[in-house]
């Protein structure tokens, strides 16, 4: 999905998987399922949970010191129907085969300037284009990890 562009949102306009912040004492799996319903209208309670990928700390210079990303993987529910976008957060969304995003997809590189005090730090970043979706950073790393578990060939 592509996040809606909003002033002050550090992920504004980025391509991402559904997600958000957990409520106080909310289990991470419940948070992932809730956010998927809220952002895409996709209920996962009848879907098969395949597992959890690596819990990733966001960059240490992020404004939330204890911010982590905990990706969960589900088999798409059969007859899932169209996605219903939360218009305040999601600009667009679509189903894309995972191999179109990571397996042999042409890569580009660019420099991203992390805002670290006292000076910005340049970081070389990979990106993959899927039609008009620019997949990079944390989202690309999560999808690459998932692709590593899939059979090759």
Image (cartoon, rainbow, N blue to C red):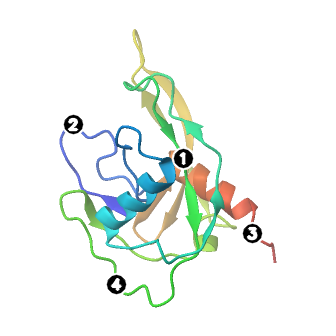
Q: Which residue is mark 4?
A: 82
Relative to the observer, which residue lies in front, 134 or 72? 72
| Secondary structure found at label 3 | loop
Cα separation, mark 2 vs mark 3, equals: 37 Å
Cα separation, mark 1 vs mark 3, equals: 19 Å
Give whichever of discs 1 and 3 has the lower sequence position: 1
Q: How many neighbours does mark 4 have within 10 angstroms: few (below 14), some (14-19), or many (20 or more)?
A: few
Q: How many marks?
A: 4
Task: Please tell me which residue is depicted at 44% across the width and 27% down the height of the picture.
Answer: 114
Give whichever of discs 2 and 3 has the lower sequence position: 2
In this rendering, position of residue 102 left or right of residue 40: right
Relative to the observer, which residue lies in front, 139 or 123? 139
| Secondary structure found at label 1 | loop
Q: Which residue is mark 3?
A: 150
| Secondary structure found at label 2 | loop
Please identify the quadrant where the N terminus is shown. bottom left
| Secondary structure found at label 4 | loop
Q: Which residue is mark 2?
A: 8
Give whichever of discs 1 and 4 has the lower sequence position: 1
């Amino acid at each position: 999905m592509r996040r809606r562009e909003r002033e002050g949102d550090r992920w504004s306009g980025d391509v991402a998987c559904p997600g958000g912040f957990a409520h106080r004492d909310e289990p991470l799996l419940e948070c992932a399922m809730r956010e998927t319903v809220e952002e895409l209208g996709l209920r996962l309670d009848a879907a098969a949970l395949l597992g959890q990928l690596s819990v990733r700390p966001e960059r240490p210079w992020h404004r939330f010191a204890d911010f982590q990303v905990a990706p969960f993987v589900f088999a798409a529910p059969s007859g899932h129907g169209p996605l219903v976008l939360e218009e305040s957060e999601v600009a667009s969304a679509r189903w894309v085969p995972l191999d179109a995003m990571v397996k042999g997809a042409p890569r580009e590189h660019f420099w991203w300037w992390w805002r670290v005090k006292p000076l910005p730090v340049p970081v070389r970043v990979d990106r993959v284009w899927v039609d008009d979706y620019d997949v990079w950073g944390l989202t690309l790393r999560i999808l690459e990890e998932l692709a590593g578990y899939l059979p090759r060939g």
